Amino acid sequence: MGSDAVESKKKPYRPGEASRNYFKLPPVKREAIREEVNRRFRGETGVTRDLDPTSKADLELRRIWLRMRDEAMEVVEYEEFIEFKADMLLPDGISDEMRSNGWEEAAELMETWFSRPPAFAPKGYSAPVTDIIKMDWVLKFPVARSVYDDIFKDRVWSNVPSQKRTAEILKTKPRLSFGQTVPFGDLSLGVATVDQEWINARPVEGQLIPDGLQAALHAFVFNIAVAGKVTTAAATPQEYIQMAGKASLKLQVTIEEVGVYVKDSFDFNGNQFLGWWGPANVPINNSDFQRWRAENHTGGDFLVYSDVKRTRLNPTDTVTVWV
């Protein structure tokens, strides 16, 4: 044995976390670890007798035994960590803890993911989920309520990006004759259908403070759709000159109703830390769910929609677009 190793062996032993955890174990587990350490100690030192806890001659041997015991504890704790992490990733693991916190929506979304065959966002989403997240519930959380209120304060549906998006939608519809008026948008349809004609969106950023909203959605967007009517409008010669080669028909869109809804992707792509879970505060990452899906052949990514929260405008709003 080299001199450095000898000096290392002579260093005083100072009990640490592993030692404290050893004495917290039930007697049966403590005895099992003791027997395993004795076996290793005899094999590596050749000493088969009992050590004298009062003898200076046995001091270094006692230090060796204690260090071996701490190493054995670290192995046990790591194995328990891996086992607990696996338990947390069972279909009812994290979802059970979510329910214990009152996070019912998050638990239902998690269970939906586990119940589905493998599907990979963004190209291979399974069927969207539209019946778990409700706007009235989302708006109970200040971070979401603030963004929602700003949508109406800023009249987002009438800004330039919304006008461009509205024009894109109208270009896909039958061309209007001069003087013709037709309905535009229908917020009574299913949310996935309404989403095909969204005109703008506002992000809601994820927060560090854990709550039901963060557990269910973390960061997501409020999508905005509108309903009303569209009619042709007379254009001045100057406007026709300005729009030459770009568009030829001027339309007025009367916005009578605004719909706002949640849209999110429930997936575990990328490398993202998802928090500390369980009484042992086990760190869970996206990679844990990716590994689960690969090993168990379940875990389907999906889009999440809330219901559409509809608001009638009084007075109505009017925007002009060219198609």
Image (spheres, rainbow, N blue to C red):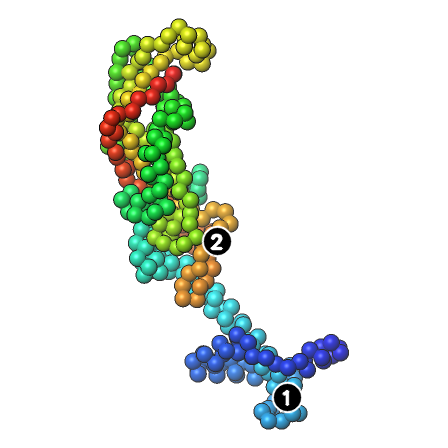
Could one spot residue 80 in this view of the protein? yes
Quadrant position of residue 199 = top left
Q: Foreground: 278 or 204?
A: 204
Judge the density around disc 1: few (<14), some (14-19), many (≥20) Cα neighbours within 10 Å. some
Specify whether 214 is left or right of 70. left
Rendered location of residue 159, percent (x, y): 38, 27
- Identify the mark nearer the N-term, 1 or 2: 1
Residue 136: x and y in percent read 27, 44
Q: Amino acid at mark 2?
A: Phe
Report helix, strand or loop for mark 2: strand
* CA neighbours of label 2 inside 10 A, class few (<14), some (14 to 19), many (20+): few
Per the image, the residue denoted by label 2 is: 273
Most foreground residue, 189 or 235: 235
Give the side of residue 287 with respect to residue 55, left or right: left
Give the CA separation, mark 1 to mark 2.
Answer: 45 Å
Question: Which residue in the rendered view is the most extreme toward the top?
Answer: 237
Q: Please give the name of the residue rendered at 35% of the width and 42% of the height, measured from the top-left corner.
A: 146
Residue type marked 1: Leu
- Quarter placement of the C terminus: top left
Question: Residue shown at 44%/38% (left/top)?
Answer: 123
Between 161 and 131, the one nearer to me in the picture: 161
Q: Secondary structure at mark 1?
A: helix
- The answer to whether residue 119 shows anywhere in this view is no
Residue 138: x %, y % from top left: 31, 46
Residue tagged 1: 59
Which residue appears at 24% of the width and 31% of the height? 312
Residue drawn at the location 40% of the way across and 63% of the way down: 278
